[in-house]
Amino acid sequence: MATKPGIPKGTRDFSPAEMAKRNYIFDTIREVFYTFGFQPIETPAMENFSTLMGKYGEEGDKLLFKILNSGDCLNNIKDDELLERNALKFAAKVCEKGLRYDLTVPFARYVVAHRDELSFPFKRFQIQPVWRADRPQKGRYREFYQCDADVVGSDSLLNEVDLVQMIDAVYLKFGIRVSIKMNNRKILTGIAEIIGQADKIVDITVAIDKLDKIGLDNVNAELAEKGIPAKAIETLQPIIQLSGDNRSKLATLRTVLATSEIGLKGVDEMEFVLNSLEHLDIKNEVEVDLTLARGLNYYTGTIFEVKALDVQIGSISGGGRYDNLTGIFGMPGVSGVGISFGADRIYDVLNQLDLYPKSAARGTQVMFVNFGAAEAAYCLPLVAKLRAAGIASELYPDSVKMKKQMSFANDHAIPYVVMVGESEMQSGQLSVKNMVTGEQGAMTIEELVALVAKA
Protein backbone atom coordinates (compact mmCIF):
# COMPACT_ATOMS: atom_id res chain seq x y z
CA MET A 1 0.00 0.00 0.00
CA ALA A 2 1.33 3.43 -0.94
CA THR A 3 2.35 5.69 1.94
CA LYS A 4 0.09 8.66 2.48
CA PRO A 5 1.75 11.93 1.50
CA GLY A 6 2.49 14.13 4.49
CA ILE A 7 3.17 17.79 5.17
CA PRO A 8 6.17 19.43 6.89
CA LYS A 9 6.15 19.51 10.69
CA GLY A 10 4.77 22.74 12.05
CA THR A 11 2.33 23.24 9.17
CA ARG A 12 -1.36 22.36 8.88
CA ASP A 13 -4.10 21.62 6.36
CA PHE A 14 -7.42 23.38 6.89
CA SER A 15 -10.79 21.93 5.93
CA PRO A 16 -13.67 24.07 4.59
CA ALA A 17 -15.17 24.25 8.10
CA GLU A 18 -11.82 25.32 9.55
CA MET A 19 -11.33 27.88 6.78
CA ALA A 20 -14.74 29.37 7.59
CA LYS A 21 -13.49 29.92 11.16
CA ARG A 22 -10.18 31.36 9.98
CA ASN A 23 -11.91 33.73 7.59
CA TYR A 24 -14.12 34.87 10.47
CA ILE A 25 -10.92 35.78 12.35
CA PHE A 26 -9.37 37.60 9.39
CA ASP A 27 -12.61 39.45 8.57
CA THR A 28 -13.11 40.55 12.19
CA ILE A 29 -9.56 41.88 12.53
CA ARG A 30 -9.70 43.49 9.09
CA GLU A 31 -12.92 45.30 10.00
CA VAL A 32 -11.30 46.79 13.12
CA PHE A 33 -8.19 47.79 11.14
CA TYR A 34 -10.33 49.72 8.66
CA THR A 35 -12.26 51.35 11.54
CA PHE A 36 -9.00 52.76 12.91
CA GLY A 37 -7.89 54.15 9.54
CA PHE A 38 -5.42 51.48 8.41
CA GLN A 39 -5.09 50.51 4.73
CA PRO A 40 -3.95 47.12 3.30
CA ILE A 41 -0.73 46.28 1.49
CA GLU A 42 1.00 42.98 0.60
CA THR A 43 4.66 42.04 0.28
CA PRO A 44 6.28 38.90 -1.26
CA ALA A 45 6.54 35.65 0.70
CA MET A 46 10.29 35.71 0.04
CA GLU A 47 12.69 38.58 0.62
CA ASN A 48 16.35 39.01 -0.19
CA PHE A 49 18.19 37.27 2.62
CA SER A 50 20.20 40.45 3.26
CA THR A 51 16.90 42.21 4.04
CA LEU A 52 16.07 39.71 6.79
CA MET A 53 19.45 38.82 8.31
CA GLY A 54 20.53 40.75 11.38
CA LYS A 55 17.10 42.28 12.08
CA TYR A 56 15.80 39.82 14.70
CA GLY A 57 18.76 39.32 17.02
CA GLU A 58 20.99 36.27 17.20
CA GLU A 59 18.18 33.91 18.24
CA GLY A 60 15.76 35.21 15.62
CA ASP A 61 18.33 34.92 12.83
CA LYS A 62 18.70 31.20 13.59
CA LEU A 63 15.00 30.71 12.81
CA LEU A 64 15.10 32.19 9.31
CA PHE A 65 14.10 29.80 6.53
CA LYS A 66 16.67 30.01 3.73
CA ILE A 67 15.89 29.35 0.05
CA LEU A 68 18.54 27.67 -2.08
CA ASN A 69 19.46 29.57 -5.22
CA SER A 70 17.79 28.12 -8.29
CA GLY A 71 19.86 26.16 -10.81
CA ASP A 72 23.25 24.78 -9.82
CA CYS A 73 23.59 26.41 -6.40
CA LEU A 74 26.96 24.66 -5.87
CA ASN A 75 28.50 26.07 -9.01
CA ASN A 76 30.67 28.62 -7.18
CA ILE A 77 31.40 26.48 -4.12
CA LYS A 78 34.85 24.95 -3.86
CA ASP A 79 35.46 21.51 -2.37
CA ASP A 80 37.42 22.91 0.55
CA GLU A 81 34.47 25.16 1.43
CA LEU A 82 32.20 22.10 1.58
CA LEU A 83 34.69 20.26 3.75
CA GLU A 84 34.88 23.28 6.06
CA ARG A 85 31.24 22.56 7.06
CA ASN A 86 30.58 26.20 8.01
CA ALA A 87 26.79 26.40 7.70
CA LEU A 88 26.49 30.20 7.91
CA LYS A 89 29.27 30.83 5.41
CA PHE A 90 27.82 28.20 3.07
CA ALA A 91 24.30 29.65 3.32
CA ALA A 92 25.59 33.13 2.52
CA LYS A 93 26.84 31.82 -0.84
CA VAL A 94 23.99 29.55 -1.87
CA CYS A 95 20.95 31.30 -0.39
CA GLU A 96 20.20 34.77 -1.68
CA LYS A 97 16.57 34.68 -0.55
CA GLY A 98 14.60 33.66 2.54
CA LEU A 99 11.00 33.30 3.65
CA ARG A 100 9.82 36.27 5.66
CA TYR A 101 10.06 35.83 9.44
CA ASP A 102 7.49 38.51 10.21
CA LEU A 103 5.65 41.31 8.44
CA THR A 104 7.38 44.26 10.15
CA VAL A 105 10.82 44.08 8.51
CA PRO A 106 9.31 43.58 5.02
CA PHE A 107 7.07 46.58 5.79
CA ALA A 108 10.10 48.70 6.69
CA ARG A 109 11.69 47.64 3.39
CA TYR A 110 8.42 48.54 1.61
CA VAL A 111 8.38 52.02 3.16
CA VAL A 112 11.94 52.72 2.02
CA ALA A 113 11.32 51.33 -1.47
CA HIS A 114 8.11 53.35 -1.93
CA ARG A 115 8.97 56.45 0.09
CA ASP A 116 8.18 58.83 -2.82
CA GLU A 117 4.67 57.40 -3.16
CA LEU A 118 3.68 57.52 0.51
CA SER A 119 2.10 60.27 2.59
CA PHE A 120 3.18 60.26 6.23
CA PRO A 121 2.08 59.25 8.76
CA PHE A 122 1.37 56.05 6.83
CA LYS A 123 -0.98 53.51 8.44
CA ARG A 124 -0.95 50.05 6.89
CA PHE A 125 -2.18 46.59 7.71
CA GLN A 126 -1.16 43.19 6.34
CA ILE A 127 -2.75 39.77 6.78
CA GLN A 128 -0.29 37.23 5.36
CA PRO A 129 1.63 34.07 6.36
CA VAL A 130 5.14 34.09 7.86
CA TRP A 131 7.63 31.26 8.44
CA ARG A 132 9.97 30.42 11.32
CA ALA A 133 12.25 27.39 11.65
CA ASP A 134 11.13 26.90 15.24
CA ARG A 135 10.54 23.65 17.13
CA PRO A 136 6.84 22.82 16.60
CA GLN A 137 4.75 22.48 19.75
CA LYS A 138 1.26 23.31 20.98
CA GLY A 139 0.38 26.82 19.83
CA ARG A 140 3.68 27.22 17.96
CA TYR A 141 3.91 26.57 14.22
CA ARG A 142 6.51 26.95 11.50
CA GLU A 143 4.00 28.46 9.11
CA PHE A 144 1.39 30.81 10.52
CA TYR A 145 -0.52 33.96 9.71
CA GLN A 146 0.10 37.37 11.21
CA CYS A 147 -2.34 40.24 11.12
CA ASP A 148 -0.23 43.40 11.48
CA ALA A 149 -1.10 47.07 11.76
CA ASP A 150 1.64 49.73 11.86
CA VAL A 151 1.95 53.50 11.79
CA VAL A 152 5.19 55.04 10.47
CA GLY A 153 6.24 58.65 10.23
CA SER A 154 4.89 59.80 13.61
CA ASP A 155 6.53 60.03 17.04
CA SER A 156 3.24 60.69 18.81
CA LEU A 157 2.36 58.42 21.71
CA LEU A 158 -1.28 58.81 20.66
CA ASN A 159 -0.49 56.01 18.22
CA GLU A 160 0.26 53.70 21.16
CA VAL A 161 -3.04 54.75 22.75
CA ASP A 162 -4.83 53.91 19.48
CA LEU A 163 -3.20 50.48 19.33
CA VAL A 164 -4.36 49.60 22.85
CA GLN A 165 -7.90 50.62 21.88
CA MET A 166 -7.62 48.50 18.74
CA ILE A 167 -6.42 45.47 20.70
CA ASP A 168 -9.32 45.92 23.10
CA ALA A 169 -11.83 46.26 20.22
CA VAL A 170 -10.61 43.10 18.45
CA TYR A 171 -10.82 40.86 21.51
CA LEU A 172 -14.18 42.29 22.55
CA LYS A 173 -15.53 41.26 19.14
CA PHE A 174 -14.10 37.77 19.63
CA GLY A 175 -15.40 37.53 23.19
CA ILE A 176 -11.91 36.62 24.49
CA ARG A 177 -10.88 38.04 27.88
CA VAL A 178 -7.28 39.21 27.68
CA SER A 179 -4.59 40.99 29.63
CA ILE A 180 -2.82 43.70 27.62
CA LYS A 181 0.71 43.79 29.00
CA MET A 182 2.90 46.86 28.46
CA ASN A 183 6.51 47.78 29.05
CA ASN A 184 9.05 50.16 27.53
CA ARG A 185 12.48 49.28 26.19
CA LYS A 186 13.80 52.59 27.57
CA ILE A 187 12.86 51.37 31.06
CA LEU A 188 14.73 48.13 30.42
CA THR A 189 17.73 50.10 29.15
CA GLY A 190 17.59 52.22 32.31
CA ILE A 191 17.52 49.09 34.46
CA ALA A 192 20.60 47.79 32.62
CA GLU A 193 22.32 51.11 33.32
CA ILE A 194 21.63 51.22 37.05
CA ILE A 195 22.93 47.67 37.57
CA GLY A 196 26.08 48.66 35.68
CA GLN A 197 25.45 46.42 32.65
CA ALA A 198 24.38 48.88 29.94
CA ASP A 199 26.35 46.98 27.29
CA LYS A 200 24.43 43.79 28.13
CA ILE A 201 20.93 45.15 27.43
CA VAL A 202 20.23 42.59 24.67
CA ASP A 203 21.32 39.64 26.83
CA ILE A 204 19.26 40.92 29.75
CA THR A 205 16.07 41.50 27.73
CA VAL A 206 16.32 38.16 25.92
CA ALA A 207 16.69 36.37 29.26
CA ILE A 208 13.95 38.10 31.27
CA ASP A 209 11.53 37.79 28.33
CA LYS A 210 11.60 34.04 29.09
CA LEU A 211 10.58 34.44 32.75
CA ASP A 212 7.06 33.03 32.36
CA LYS A 213 8.37 30.15 30.22
CA ILE A 214 11.44 28.93 32.11
CA GLY A 215 11.10 30.46 35.59
CA LEU A 216 13.24 32.84 37.64
CA ASP A 217 16.03 30.40 38.51
CA ASN A 218 16.65 29.51 34.86
CA VAL A 219 16.54 33.19 33.86
CA ASN A 220 19.17 33.96 36.50
CA ALA A 221 21.27 31.05 35.25
CA GLU A 222 21.07 32.35 31.69
CA LEU A 223 22.06 35.85 32.83
CA ALA A 224 25.09 34.37 34.60
CA GLU A 225 26.01 32.42 31.47
CA LYS A 226 25.95 35.71 29.52
CA GLY A 227 28.53 37.17 31.88
CA ILE A 228 26.25 39.27 34.08
CA PRO A 229 27.92 39.54 37.53
CA ALA A 230 26.17 37.98 40.55
CA LYS A 231 25.76 41.40 42.24
CA ALA A 232 24.01 42.81 39.16
CA ILE A 233 21.71 39.77 38.97
CA GLU A 234 20.89 40.23 42.67
CA THR A 235 20.07 43.92 42.10
CA LEU A 236 17.81 42.93 39.21
CA GLN A 237 15.59 40.58 41.25
CA PRO A 238 13.22 43.04 42.98
CA ILE A 239 12.88 45.03 39.76
CA ILE A 240 11.73 42.20 37.52
CA GLN A 241 9.46 40.86 40.29
CA LEU A 242 7.89 44.26 40.97
CA SER A 243 4.26 43.93 42.10
CA GLY A 244 1.31 46.22 42.78
CA ASP A 245 -0.98 48.25 40.52
CA ASN A 246 0.28 50.19 37.51
CA ARG A 247 0.57 53.49 39.41
CA SER A 248 2.61 52.02 42.25
CA LYS A 249 4.91 50.23 39.78
CA LEU A 250 5.62 53.49 37.92
CA ALA A 251 6.17 55.36 41.19
CA THR A 252 8.69 52.73 42.31
CA LEU A 253 10.42 52.87 38.93
CA ARG A 254 10.79 56.65 39.17
CA THR A 255 12.72 56.15 42.40
CA VAL A 256 14.77 53.18 41.19
CA LEU A 257 15.65 54.86 37.87
CA ALA A 258 16.30 58.32 39.32
CA THR A 259 19.86 58.38 37.92
CA SER A 260 18.94 57.08 34.45
CA GLU A 261 17.74 59.72 31.99
CA ILE A 262 16.61 57.19 29.40
CA GLY A 263 14.89 55.07 32.05
CA LEU A 264 12.87 58.05 33.30
CA LYS A 265 11.91 58.92 29.72
CA GLY A 266 10.48 55.41 29.39
CA VAL A 267 8.47 55.91 32.60
CA ASP A 268 7.14 59.24 31.22
CA GLU A 269 6.04 57.53 28.00
CA MET A 270 4.32 54.72 29.87
CA GLU A 271 2.56 57.22 32.14
CA PHE A 272 1.26 59.23 29.16
CA VAL A 273 -0.27 56.13 27.56
CA LEU A 274 -1.87 54.98 30.84
CA ASN A 275 -3.23 58.47 31.61
CA SER A 276 -4.77 58.68 28.13
CA LEU A 277 -6.39 55.25 28.48
CA GLU A 278 -8.03 56.27 31.77
CA HIS A 279 -10.41 58.53 29.81
CA LEU A 280 -11.39 55.74 27.41
CA ASP A 281 -13.74 52.82 27.93
CA ILE A 282 -11.16 50.03 27.80
CA LYS A 283 -12.84 46.76 28.80
CA ASN A 284 -9.78 44.49 29.09
CA GLU A 285 -7.10 44.93 31.74
CA VAL A 286 -3.93 46.83 30.89
CA GLU A 287 -0.94 45.79 33.02
CA VAL A 288 2.56 47.20 33.37
CA ASP A 289 4.82 44.13 33.21
CA LEU A 290 8.56 44.67 33.62
CA THR A 291 9.36 41.09 32.59
CA LEU A 292 7.96 41.84 29.14
CA ALA A 293 10.96 42.37 26.87
CA ARG A 294 9.89 41.12 23.41
CA GLY A 295 13.21 39.55 22.38
CA LEU A 296 13.40 41.41 19.04
CA ASN A 297 16.20 43.94 18.87
CA TYR A 298 14.38 46.56 16.83
CA TYR A 299 11.99 47.77 19.57
CA THR A 300 13.00 51.10 21.11
CA GLY A 301 9.99 52.32 23.14
CA THR A 302 6.61 50.96 24.19
CA ILE A 303 6.19 47.20 23.85
CA PHE A 304 2.95 45.21 24.00
CA GLU A 305 1.98 41.62 24.57
CA VAL A 306 -1.51 40.15 24.89
CA LYS A 307 -2.32 37.02 26.91
CA ALA A 308 -5.65 35.15 26.91
CA LEU A 309 -6.95 34.84 30.48
CA ASP A 310 -9.05 31.68 30.09
CA VAL A 311 -6.69 29.48 28.03
CA GLN A 312 -3.14 28.29 28.69
CA ILE A 313 -1.30 29.43 25.57
CA GLY A 314 1.51 31.84 24.67
CA SER A 315 0.97 35.45 23.69
CA ILE A 316 -1.75 35.97 21.07
CA SER A 317 -0.69 39.49 20.07
CA GLY A 318 2.46 41.54 20.42
CA GLY A 319 4.23 44.61 19.11
CA GLY A 320 5.82 47.92 19.97
CA ARG A 321 7.67 51.00 18.80
CA TYR A 322 10.72 50.76 16.55
CA ASP A 323 12.32 54.16 15.95
CA ASN A 324 15.31 52.91 13.95
CA LEU A 325 14.05 50.14 11.70
CA THR A 326 13.86 52.00 8.38
CA GLY A 327 17.29 53.47 9.07
CA ILE A 328 18.72 50.00 8.48
CA PHE A 329 17.54 50.35 4.88
CA GLY A 330 18.97 53.84 4.34
CA MET A 331 16.02 55.94 5.56
CA PRO A 332 16.82 57.24 9.06
CA GLY A 333 14.51 59.29 11.25
CA VAL A 334 11.24 57.47 10.51
CA SER A 335 9.58 56.28 13.69
CA GLY A 336 7.08 53.46 13.69
CA VAL A 337 4.83 51.53 16.07
CA GLY A 338 2.74 48.46 15.40
CA ILE A 339 0.86 45.43 16.66
CA SER A 340 0.63 41.87 15.34
CA PHE A 341 -2.32 39.55 15.99
CA GLY A 342 -1.41 35.86 15.93
CA ALA A 343 -4.30 34.44 13.90
CA ASP A 344 -3.35 30.79 14.48
CA ARG A 345 -3.26 31.14 18.25
CA ILE A 346 -6.50 33.14 18.22
CA TYR A 347 -7.98 30.26 16.20
CA ASP A 348 -6.93 27.79 18.90
CA VAL A 349 -8.29 30.00 21.70
CA LEU A 350 -11.67 30.44 19.97
CA ASN A 351 -11.83 26.67 19.45
CA GLN A 352 -11.07 25.87 23.08
CA LEU A 353 -13.60 28.40 24.37
CA ASP A 354 -16.19 27.57 21.68
CA LEU A 355 -16.67 31.24 20.84
CA TYR A 356 -17.33 31.03 17.11
CA PRO A 357 -20.73 32.49 16.12
CA LYS A 358 -23.01 30.31 14.01
CA SER A 359 -22.68 32.82 11.19
CA ALA A 360 -18.96 31.99 10.94
CA ALA A 361 -19.75 28.58 9.41
CA ARG A 362 -20.67 29.84 5.98
CA GLY A 363 -21.84 27.01 3.73
CA THR A 364 -24.60 26.04 1.35
CA GLN A 365 -27.99 27.04 2.73
CA VAL A 366 -30.23 25.41 0.11
CA MET A 367 -29.66 22.26 -1.93
CA PHE A 368 -31.91 21.12 -4.79
CA VAL A 369 -32.28 17.36 -5.26
CA ASN A 370 -31.49 16.19 -8.80
CA PHE A 371 -34.26 13.88 -10.09
CA GLY A 372 -33.13 13.91 -13.74
CA ALA A 373 -32.36 16.09 -16.75
CA ALA A 374 -35.80 17.77 -17.04
CA GLU A 375 -36.02 18.51 -13.30
CA ALA A 376 -32.43 19.77 -13.20
CA ALA A 377 -33.11 22.16 -16.10
CA TYR A 378 -36.18 23.48 -14.24
CA CYS A 379 -34.18 23.98 -11.02
CA LEU A 380 -31.23 25.86 -12.51
CA PRO A 381 -33.08 29.24 -12.78
CA LEU A 382 -34.40 28.77 -9.24
CA VAL A 383 -30.88 28.22 -7.92
CA ALA A 384 -29.78 31.34 -9.80
CA LYS A 385 -32.62 33.34 -8.20
CA LEU A 386 -31.56 32.27 -4.71
CA ARG A 387 -27.94 33.14 -5.42
CA ALA A 388 -29.00 36.56 -6.73
CA ALA A 389 -30.67 37.11 -3.35
CA GLY A 390 -27.35 36.33 -1.62
CA ILE A 391 -28.37 32.82 -0.52
CA ALA A 392 -25.71 30.11 -0.98
CA SER A 393 -27.42 27.45 -3.08
CA GLU A 394 -26.56 24.47 -5.26
CA LEU A 395 -28.13 21.76 -7.38
CA TYR A 396 -26.78 18.28 -6.70
CA PRO A 397 -24.84 17.56 -9.91
CA ASP A 398 -25.77 13.89 -10.43
CA SER A 399 -29.12 12.16 -10.67
CA VAL A 400 -28.38 9.45 -8.11
CA LYS A 401 -30.37 7.77 -5.34
CA MET A 402 -32.24 10.12 -3.05
CA LYS A 403 -30.53 8.61 0.01
CA LYS A 404 -27.10 9.59 -1.28
CA GLN A 405 -28.20 13.15 -2.01
CA MET A 406 -29.80 13.57 1.42
CA SER A 407 -26.67 12.14 3.07
CA PHE A 408 -24.65 14.76 1.22
CA ALA A 409 -26.92 17.49 2.62
CA ASN A 410 -26.53 16.09 6.15
CA ASP A 411 -22.75 15.77 5.85
CA HIS A 412 -22.48 19.42 4.80
CA ALA A 413 -25.02 20.69 7.36
CA ILE A 414 -27.22 22.17 4.64
CA PRO A 415 -30.34 23.42 6.46
CA TYR A 416 -32.84 23.32 3.56
CA VAL A 417 -33.34 20.70 0.84
CA VAL A 418 -35.68 21.40 -2.10
CA MET A 419 -37.33 18.57 -4.03
CA VAL A 420 -38.82 19.37 -7.44
CA GLY A 421 -40.53 16.53 -9.29
CA GLU A 422 -43.17 16.45 -12.01
CA SER A 423 -46.02 17.67 -9.73
CA GLU A 424 -43.94 20.58 -8.37
CA MET A 425 -43.00 21.64 -11.89
CA GLN A 426 -46.70 21.72 -12.83
CA SER A 427 -47.87 23.58 -9.70
CA GLY A 428 -44.94 25.99 -9.34
CA GLN A 429 -44.71 25.02 -5.67
CA LEU A 430 -41.47 23.68 -4.23
CA SER A 431 -41.31 20.87 -1.70
CA VAL A 432 -38.94 22.19 0.98
CA LYS A 433 -37.56 20.13 3.87
CA ASN A 434 -36.03 21.73 6.95
CA MET A 435 -33.13 19.38 7.69
CA VAL A 436 -32.87 20.59 11.30
CA THR A 437 -36.49 20.14 12.39
CA GLY A 438 -37.54 17.53 9.81
CA GLU A 439 -40.56 19.62 8.81
CA GLN A 440 -41.53 19.64 5.14
CA GLY A 441 -43.95 21.87 3.23
CA ALA A 442 -44.80 23.46 -0.12
CA MET A 443 -43.91 27.05 -1.00
CA THR A 444 -43.01 29.33 -3.90
CA ILE A 445 -39.47 30.37 -4.68
CA GLU A 446 -40.26 33.83 -3.29
CA GLU A 447 -41.44 32.32 -0.03
CA LEU A 448 -38.28 30.20 0.13
CA VAL A 449 -36.10 33.30 -0.34
CA ALA A 450 -37.95 35.03 2.51
CA LEU A 451 -37.72 31.95 4.75
CA VAL A 452 -33.98 31.46 4.34
CA ALA A 453 -33.18 35.18 4.54
CA LYS A 454 -35.02 35.33 7.88
CA ALA A 455 -33.31 32.24 9.33
Image (cartoon, rainbow, N blue to C red):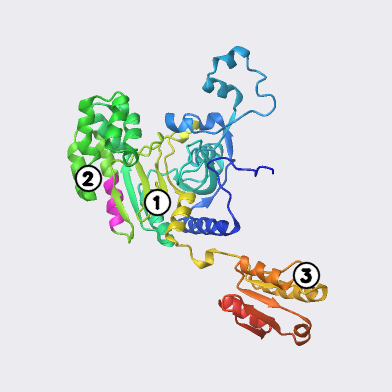
Q: Which residues are magenta?
A: 270-278
Q: Which residue is label 3 attached to?
A: 399
Quadrant of residue 191 within the rendered picture:
top left
- Mark 1 and mark 3: span between their CA atoms? 55 Å
CA neighbours of label 2 inside 10 A, class few (<14), some (14 to 19), many (20+): many
Q: Is residue 207 magenta?
A: no
Q: Which residue is found at the position 69% from the left and 82% from the top?
A: 431
- Mark 2 and mark 1: span between their CA atoms? 21 Å
Of marks 1 and 3, which one's residue comes earlier in the chain? 1
Q: Which residue is label 1 attached to?
A: 163
CA neighbours of label 1 inside 10 A, class few (<14), some (14 to 19), many (20+): many
Say which element carries label 3.
loop
- Of all residues, the one furthest to the front in this rendering is 1
Q: With 373 as the anchor, is 124 left or right in this view?
A: left
Q: Nearer the viewer, residue 228 or 44?
A: 228
Q: Which mark is residue 250?
A: 2
Q: With 47 as the anchor, is 231 left or right in this view?
A: left
